[in-house]
Image (cartoon, rainbow, N blue to C red):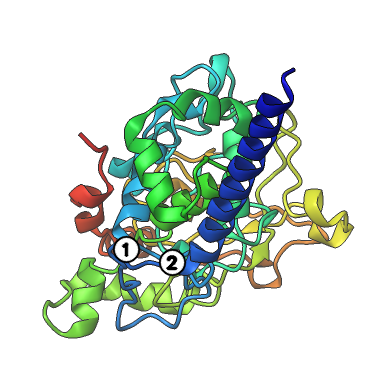
Amino acid sequence: MNPVRKSLLTMFLLVATSFTFSWLLGACKKDQNTDDIELLQQEIPGSFPQPLYKFEDNPLSKEGFELGRKLFYDPRLSADKLHPCSSCHEQVAAFGTFEHDRSHGVFESHTLRNAPVLFNLAWSSSFHWDGEFVSLQDEAVHPLTGPVEMGETFEGIIKKIQDDPEYRELFSKVFRYPFIRPEFITKALAQFTGSMIAADSKYDRYKKGTVTFNTQEENGYQLYKVNCASCHPEPLFTDYSFRNIGLPLDNLLTDYGRMRITGKSEDSLKFKVPTLRNTYISSNYMHDGRFNTLQQCINHYRTNVQPGPTLDPLLINGISLTNAQATDLVVFLRTLTDSTLLRDPRFSKPN
């Protein structure tokens, strides 16, 4: 090569490399610079305690929320391009699976467990029925990459969405980086799902003194406080613990719950206590969706609790309820339905 041309080429490469390095370094330094995005205040209902997840490492913004919403409803995130996050977490079912025992995954697969509801996640100390994950970002990895869920890889996801101009603009604006990275995908999803709040039910308005309960609702509330509140305390209606509630093992699924994570025999058949909020419209029930109705759930506690070495001590004798009391309890549980969340356009599929 001509020495002059070689010299000019070398100089060009050095300048280009220097410029690229400086640009990327500047982009990294501006990670926390949110001057040109609209920051959002985390919603904390007045009756709730302080959340555990406060978006401190993931500044909550309108753009980040919208990016998470776009990802949540995008079927391209799944291997067969047919199963977005929303296919298992439907708004009509408080972002659980509507009237299914277990969810359908890619390529006609079937998940091991019933999809849990996604609201009030910022108050949870762990995620999934067995508590495998302890952060909102980590828990999103499993459904995205699980072979019987969405079955994709981050490399595959990025390849499919990187040419979408809206994605390029949002990722660049929110995360100050020229390329889409796996952690940006999970952070955006955390902004969206972590903002889902259920705190506007009839029960909540009752506690504020703006509505009253009818006789059945009041009776059911008192029954709840005596029989259910130790594991499902107000206002979140879960204590986030793991308990064996005496469900017999499904011999086909052979799911031992928390023991799968800890390897400890004392955790056998223990599953995370779910919230009772929106339970009236989030069937099916239990970790494997074996019950279709709340009445079946209550009847389990009344007559079908199975003894065992890890059974929760509170359930050794089951829960004694008359038929009328069981009905009143169901009527109370219905007051925990937050219909606002089910209709909120902020959480619906984007146009």
Relative horizontal placement of residue 27, taking residue 12 as reference (left or right):
left
- When the figure is inspected, residue 105 is found, relative to residue 256, above or below; the finding is above
Question: Residue type at mark 1?
Answer: Ala
Q: Name the residue under label 2.
A: 59
Relative image position of residue 168 (x, y in whole percent): 40, 38
Relative image position of residue 5 (x, y in whole percent): 66, 25
Rendered-image quadrant of the N terminus: top right
- When the figure is inspected, residue 57 is found, relative to residue 117, above or below; the finding is below
Decide if residue 216 is in sight here.
no
Residue pictured at 54% horizontal, 68% vertical: 57
- When the figure is inspected, residue 300 is found, relative to residue 241, above or below; the finding is above
Whether the residues at callouts 1 and 2 have beta carbons within 8 Å, the answer is no
Foreground pick, 224 / 179: 179
Q: What kind of element bears circle 2?
A: loop
Residue pictured at 42% horizontal, 78% vertical: 225
Quarter of image, res 71:
top left
Relative image position of residue 250 (x, y in whole percent): 70, 35
Neighbours of disc 2 within 10 Å: few (<14), some (14-19), many (20+): many
First reached walking from the N terminus: tag 1 or tag 2: 2
Relative horizontal placement of residue 10, taking residue 53 as reference (left or right):
right
On residue 158, which mark appears?
none
Residue pictured at 35% horizontal, 78% vertical: 222
Question: Residue type at mark 2?
Answer: Pro
* Mark pair 1, 2: CA separation: 21 Å
Foreground pick, 239 / 127: 127
Foreground pick, 320 / 184: 184
On residue 198, which mark appears?
1
Residue pictured at 18% horizontal, 73% vertical: 215
Number of numbered discs: 2
